[in-house]
Amino acid sequence: MDYTRGAARWLLGATAHPGGQALTQHLLDRLQPSPGALVADVACGDGATLGVLARRGLLPVGVDLELRAVARARGRGTAVVGDAHHLPLVSGAYDAVVCECSVSTFADPARALSQMARVLRPGGTLAMTDVVLRRDLAPADVIAVVDRLTTARTLADYAALVEQAGLRVLRTEDRSADALALARRLTRRLAAVGARRHASTARACARAVESGALSYGLLVATKPGEGLIR
Ligand SMILES: C[S@@+](CC[C@H](N)C(=O)[O-])C[C@H]1O[C@@H](n2cnc3c(N)ncnc32)[C@H](O)[C@@H]1O
C-alpha cells in the first residue's frame, strides 16, 4: 500500500499511524533521547517523524522500502531506500530506533526487530507503536480486514518478539483512544464520499476498539549493555 498517495493522506491525516504527530511526540517523551542523538526511523514513510525528530535537535536517518516515500522524506531529513529485513545501517551506531505502525506490516517481524536490535548501540532504545489485535475477541470481518494490511498481534506477543530479538522491554502502553479516533475518522470520511461498504468496515473496527478486541499500542525496549553516554 502506498501511504504517500493523496487519498491515503486525506483518509489518515498527516501521518500513516493512529495518534498522529501527538503520539509521535509522546513516544519521544518516553524515549528521552539526548540532544544530538542518532535516531533511525525504520519505515519512515514520507518523513513526518523525521521532521519531528530534527525539530527536537536529534539526528534522524529514515529508511523505507518505497522510493516515492523516501523522495518525500528527503525534504524533511536524511532518508534512504532500504528493507527493514536487511537494514542498510551500521551495527551498534544508533542511540535510538523508532518504528511506527510498521512492524506488523513486515513479512518477517522477528527478522526486522533483530535488525533494529543490531543497529542499536548497547544502552540504546527502541520505541515502536503498532496495531494490536485480540484474535480471541475480534469478529471475523474485523480480523479479515486487519489481516489484509498487517500481522497484528497482542502487545504481549510484540513484547515477546522484541525480547527474542535481544532487547529488554521497559514499558508497554495501550493506545486504544488513538485507534478509536482513527476508526471514527475513517468511518466519517468514507461515508462522506459514499464508500458505504468501506465505511461500514471502519465502523466495525470502531466497535471492535470499543470492545477491547482491536487497539493500538506503544512499546519501549532497551539493548542491554552500557554503551556510550551521549
Ligand atoms: C503504515 S506506514 C507507516 C509510515 C510511518 N512510519 C508513519 O507512521 O507515518 C508503513 C510503512 O512501512 C513501509 N514498509 C513496508 N514494508 C517495509 C520494509 N520491508 N522495509 C522498509 N519499509 C517498509 C511502507 O513503505 C510504509 O511507508
Image (tube, rainbow, N blue to C red):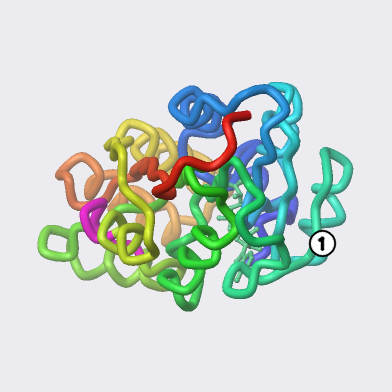
Locate residue 10 relative to residue 221 in the image: left or right.
Answer: right
Locate residue 197 relative to residue 176 in the image: left or right.
Answer: right
Residue 129 visible at all: no
Seen at 17% across and 45% down, the residue is 212
Q: In the rendered image, which quarter is residue 49 located in?
A: top right
- Looking at the picture, how far across and down is residue 183, in whole percent? 40, 43
Residue 175 visible at all: yes
Q: In the rendered image, which quarter is residue 13 located in?
A: top right
For label 1, the SS is: helix
Quadrant where the C terminus sits is top right
Per the image, is 138 magenta? no
**Mark 1: C-beta under 8 Å from nearest atom of ligand 1:** no
- Looking at the picture, how far across and down is residue 80, in whole percent? 80, 59
Seen at 47% across and 61% down, the residue is 103
- Looking at the picture, how far across and down is residue 140, in whole percent? 21, 70
Residue at mark 1: 68
Residue nearest the viewer, comparing 186 with 147: 147
Q: In the rendered image, which quarter is residue 201 located in?
A: bottom left
Task: Answer with the quadrant where ligand 1 appears in the image.
Answer: bottom right
- Please report the bounds of the magenta region as a residue range: 152-157
- Looking at the picture, how far across and down is residue 178, in whole percent? 39, 34
Could you tell me the amino acid type at mark 1? Arg
Residue 16 vs 197, above or below: the answer is above
Residue nearest the viewer, comparing 17 with 5: 17
Residue 65 vs 7, above or below: the answer is below
Farthest residue toward the left?
Answer: 136
Residue 137 vs 106, above or below: the answer is above
Label tally: 1
Locate residue 181 relative to residue 21 in the image: left or right.
Answer: left
Quadrant where the N terminus sits is bottom right
Per the image, is 155 magenta? yes
